[in-house]
Amino acid sequence: MSVFAIILSVFLIAVDAIGILGNVVVMITVCINRRFHVMRYSLLASLAASDFLFLAAVLPSRIATKLQEDLAFSVTWCKVNAFLERSLYCSGNLHLIAVSYDRYQAVVKNPLMYEEHMTLAKILMLLPL
């Protein structure tokens, strides 16, 4: 095990811990505070949930692989991990597009008539994956 691998793993563990904590704080804040129950904050909470799933499901196995290169994960876990990485990455990008479009609607297209009330259909569309 090289010194670079250890330093990289410690850095990734710190990023993972801070990312998980920050995303949990965002999701709890949006859920608890009633004034944040509008579209823009729901989109941000959904983005935080997608990022949380990535940090909790994908990054730990990447860190374990960096620490011990001959670590033998099963073929199934390798395929599941690759699927999760790609799908959560895509989910995060789609959430960023949705946030950008929401801000476009609010600022440029229709600032005086912007409708931001949440409906059940909008909430169901925001579920990660």
Image (spheres, rainbow, N blue to C red):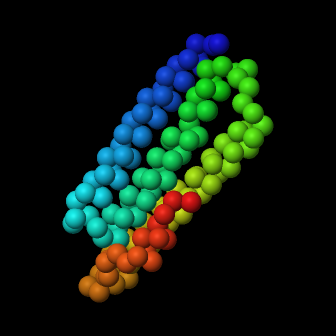
Quadrant including the C terminus? bottom right
Q: Residue at x 42, y 40 (%)?
A: 19
Looking at the rendered structure, the number of numbered marks drawn on it comes to 0
Please report the residue visible at 26 percent of the width from the left and 64 percent of the height from the top.
Answer: 36
Q: Of all residues shown, which one is farthest toward the right?
A: 75
When the figure is inspected, residue 125 is found, relative to residue 3, above or below; the finding is: below
Q: Could you tell me residue 49's position as x and y percent?
A: 44, 53
| Residue 37 at least partly seen | yes
List the single residue furthest toward the bottom. Answer: 113
Left or right: 5 as drawn, with respect to 125: right
Residue in the foreground of this view, choosing between 94 and 125? 125
Q: Toward the viewer: 43 or 27?
A: 27
Residue 93 visible in the current orientation: no
Quarter of the image for residue 18 reads top left
Q: Is residue 89 shown above or below 73?
A: below
Q: Position of residue 93 (x, y in %)?
A: 54, 59
- Residue drawn at (40%, 64%), measured in percent from left and top? 43
- Which quarter of the rendered picture does the N terminus lie within? top right
Q: Position of residue 127 (x, y in %)?
A: 48, 63
Q: Quadrant of residue 8?
A: top right
Residue 47, compared with residue 76, is above or below; it is below
